[in-house]
Amino acid sequence: MRNTSRRSAFAVTLYALLEPLPLGFFLAAWLFDIIYMKSYVLMWTHSASWLIAIGLVIAILPRILSLVYLFRGSDSAEKTHFWLSLVAIIAAILNAFIHSRDAYAVVPLGVTLSTLVVALLLLANVQLALRQRTA
């Protein structure tokens, strides 16, 4: 989200501070899912569940800010970033439901959804960074 004259400096700063945090939580959850898949130690899947829940809570505000600016007119890179992030968040919500099951039922669907969430968020951030670099 670029800072133009139509955008609040506070909102742009808040977005810049909060936007990378969910990716970190989802990446850690993905790693914990992989560790659980190899070890079957329950602590890892329980920790992944908490990381997914915290990542979802933190992901709300940046998506609301980008949604507001999406309707005010954004370039195509920002729109693509919003929609990829939104699909990732929907997949993370499904992943949270998968992780609410018995720990042994998390594998393999939970790992697959965690991989999808991380891949979508990485793709969204990389395409936006490349677009802003060339602009």
Image: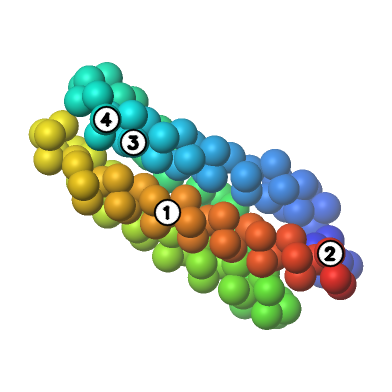
Q: Earlier in the sequence, mark 4 or mark 2?
A: 4
Q: Amino acid at mark 4?
A: Lys
Residues marked 1 and 4 touching at CB (< 8 Å): no
Q: Would residue 46 be visible to someone looking at this image?
A: no
State the image quarter where residue 129 is shown: bottom right
Graded by Cα atoms within 10 Å as few (under 14), some (14 to 19) or many (20 or more), the crowding at tag 4 reads: few
Nearer-N-terminus badge (3/1): 3
Upstream in sequence: badge 3 or badge 2:
3
- The front one of 112 and 102 is 112
The quadrant in which the C terminus is found is bottom right
Percent x, y of residue 130 = 75, 65
The amino acid sitting under disc 1 is Val
Q: Secondary structure at mark 4?
A: helix
Viewer-side residue, 8 vs 75 = 75
- In the visual, does 50 lie left or right of 69? left
**Disc 4 versus disc 2: distance between alpha carbons?**
39 Å
Tell me what residue is drawn at x 25 percent, y 34 percent: 37
* Residue toward you, 78 or 63: 78
Residue 59 in the image, given as x and y percentages of width and height:
51, 48
Q: Could you say whether the residue bearing mark 2 is in a helix, strand or loop?
A: helix
Position of residue 115 measured from the top left corner of the image (x, y, whole percent) = 39, 51
Residue under circle 4? 38
Disc 4, disc 3: CB below 8 Å? yes
Mark positioned earlier in the residue sequence (1 or 2) = 1
Picture disc at residue 106: none
Q: Quadrant of the N terminus?
A: bottom right
Residue named by callout 2? 133
* Amino acid found under the numbered disc labelled 3: Ile
Q: Gap in Å between the C-alphas at discs 3 and 2?
A: 33 Å
What's the CA distance linking mark 4 and mark 3? 6 Å
* Residue identifier under label 3: 34
